[in-house]
Amino acid sequence: MTSHIARNYAPLPVEIASADGAWTTDTEGRRYLDMLAGYSALNFGHRNADLVKAAKDQLDRVTLTSRAFSSDRLEPFAAALADLCGKDLVLPMNTGAEAVETGIKVARAWGYRVKGIPEGRAKIVVAENNFHGRTTTIVGFSNDDDARADFGPFAPGFVTVPFGDADALAAAIDDDTAAVLIEPIQGEAGIVVPPDGYLTAVREVTRSRNVLMIADEIQSGLGRTGHTFACDREGVVPDMYLLGKALGGGIVPVSAVVADEDVLGVIEPGQHGSTFGGNPLAAAVGHAVVTMLATGEWQERARRLGEHLEGRLAPLIGSGVTELRCVGLWAGIDVDPSLGTGREISERLLARGVLVKDTHGQTIRMAPPLTIRPTELDWAVEQLALVLRT
């Protein structure tokens, strides 16, 4: 069969036709346990009833006004999200990459207009093995050859340091540095967790050197790690949060930049925008997501289920698993190369009814919906153990 879809992905050989909670069903009626959850976009499961209701109710009212006009859904959403983050202002966008691009623009504007960096010299410090999206600006400071090759020339103004090395980061900051942009936990790299105290050190050096700390919590945030944000693991509050994925509940694309007035207030009308950013449908769903997170119940559930998952995965170390990294309900599992690549292991799990995805050769990721049951986690790990033995 001829495909008319551009080959920018190499999906596993399954066609999903329907889904509910943590389960999906393909076009032939076979069911699969979703242990990826749309890279954390589906933190609250497929077709979460509260989120579907919010979307359906809004579909009957108005879905788009553009930001040429206001809507009655935007301010309540922004107020709730600002309160969840402990910040003053929200700049809504659509995708995670747009949130990162927005954060870069805001940081540069702040560097020139507030810090006083000479025009054209603002720098942003980033980490090796980062993943912040796939726009040309963002891939320009990636060290992934697949992401970069043949897409240049790239924008200057980025300085790369090793992830988790606070001393290297501090040494890279100079008078022209506007911001440090990091993932508190690197998701695409394989759930790479920095050393204890790293985020605290980043917060201290950025504050002392008058540099913005920008936390890309697009994949790590909104309950995934057992906290609202991964930065909460060290009690760190960045100057700017970049949010996305789960903010849209797996229903519509919703992203946001959240910061205080003295940072986000540098953007004036006409300097940044998006036709769909903050649209009423997105705001209604995003507000419902924030309302769910405000109780803390989902964060606690992720913490408890994450401990359960780690307890089941840990015995596999030395029996096909070479390294395991778990934070909340999020696991990076490095597979012994003698047993196959991460892609091959993912395909074998698919055949047994479990959806996961590989990254960087030998790593598979597990990031199931927070709605999953302990018994379902047990079953998924049992399938992995069987795959590793065959």
Image (spheres, rainbow, N blue to C red):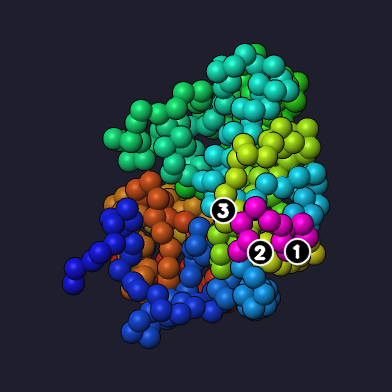
**3 with respect to 307 (left or right):** left
Residue 122 placed where, x, y %? 58, 20
Q: Earlier in the sequence, mark 1 or mark 3?
A: 1
Q: Residue at x 61, y 27 (%)?
A: 108
Q: Residue at x 61, y 56 (%)?
A: 66
Residue 280's mark? 2
Q: Secondary structure at mark 2?
A: helix
Residue 348 placed where, x, y %? 33, 67
**Given the current orientation, which residue lies at the most extreme bottom position?**
29
Q: Which quarter of the figure has residue 6?
A: bottom left
Q: Earlier in the sequence, mark 3 or mark 2?
A: 3
Residue type, mark 3 in image: Thr
Vertical arrangement, residue 389 with respect to residue 218, above or below: below
Q: Secondary structure at mark 3?
A: loop
| Total numbered circles | 3
Vertical arrangement, residue 13 with respect to residue 261, above or below: below
Residue 69 painted magenta = yes
Determine crowd level at label 2: few under 14, some 14-19, many 20+ residues with C-alpha closer than 10 A: many
**Given the current orientation, which residue lies at the most extreme front position?**
68
Question: What residue is shown with label 3?
Answer: 275
| Measured Cα–Cα span from mark 1 to mark 3 | 17 Å
| Measured Cα–Cα span from mark 3 to mark 2 | 12 Å
| Measured Cα–Cα span from mark 1 to mark 2 | 8 Å
Residue type, mark 2 in image: Pro
**78 with respect to 92 (left or right):** right
